[in-house]
Each structure stands twice: as C-alpha cells, then as structure tokens.
Amino acid sequence: MGGSDSEGEKSVQKEKEKKKLLALAPIAKPLAGKKLCKRTLKLVRRAAEHKCLKRGVKEVVKSIRRGNKGLCVIAGNISPIDVITHVPILCEEAEIPYVYVPSKEDLANAGSTKRPTCCVLVLTKPTKGELGQEEQEKLKGDYDQIASDVSELAASMF
C-alpha cells in the first residue's frame, strides 16, 4: 500500500512542476536548471538568515542604482511580465549576474516571506552590522560558486 501512495505523490509533484513550467514567461532566460535552482534558493535562504537580502522589485532596483553588488534572482512566472522586464537590463549595465527560477512562491519561501516575491538581490555582506568571519566566508564561498555557474549559463546562451 505504501508504494502506490508515494507514487501518487510523485505524480502530483510532477503535475506541479509542469504547471510551473507552463506559467513561465518567454523572457525567463537564463533559467536555472533543477540542481542550480535548488542551490540558488538555498543561498537565498542563508542570505535571508544573515540579513544579506533585498526583496522585491523596488528594493532591488534601488540597491542596484546605489551600486551594491550581488546576485539577482528573478522569478520566471510573474504576471504581468512588465513588472520585472527592466531588472535584467539594470543588472547587465551594473555587471551583476542574474538568473531566473521557475516559481515566485518558492523564491518567497527561500527568502522567508509569506508573500510571493518577484525578485531578490543576494548581497555579499549585510547592510547593517557585521557577520562572523566563518559565516562571512561560507556565504561568500557559496555566492562565488553560484555566481560563476550563473555566468557560465548566461555565456552558453549568447
């Protein structure tokens, strides 16, 4: 009995994945694959714990214009898409790596908010205060790894 139940759950999971991919906007490129998406959301979660995260279009745009560097993570299932179409252009001008993830809900959960989030900017250091040396190095290491993966993904597109 247990086997059929878990298979049923898997099919439900697959249906959810399909719905997420159908809701994707046509401009959602470079889109993170399953593995990169998981690692990116993990980085967002860790950044949220250490207060190194800017949430929402308004905050992200303000940070980029002020010259803050980081990794921009954008949700691919935003409707209307016009809300975020200017963010990738700003990122490219400021030489900030950016990547799309399939779901705004997953992005919000990773960023520890209940409200679905269009985009977040993962900063390398917190806006206020300081992090411990160990935590700072761990966050920076994860950030560098994902930023290089994102850059490779973007380079393979063009």
Image (cartoon, rainbow, N blue to C red):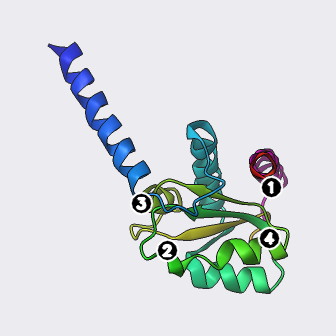
Quote the CA–CA distance across marks 3 and 1: 27 Å
Sequence-wise, which precedes: disc 4 or disc 1?
4
Q: Which quadrant of the figure has residue 77? A: bottom left
Q: Residue at x 63, y 49 (%)?
A: 40
Which quadrant would the N terminus be assigned to in this image?
top left
Q: Which residue is mark 4?
A: 92
Q: Amino acid at mark 4?
A: Glu
User: Foreground: 42 or 152?
Assistant: 152
User: Foreground: 28 or 114?
Assistant: 28
In the depicted structure, whether residue 49 falls above or below residue 37: below
In the depicted structure, whether residue 110 falls above or below residue 152: below
In the depicted structure, whether residue 101 falls above or below residue 59: above
Q: Amino acid at mark 2?
A: Ile
User: Foreground: 132 or 4?
Assistant: 4
Horizontally, is 22 left or right of 10 in the view?
A: right
The disc label shown at residue 105, or none: 3
Q: Secondary structure at mark 3?
A: helix
- The stretch of residues the image draws in magenta is 129-153
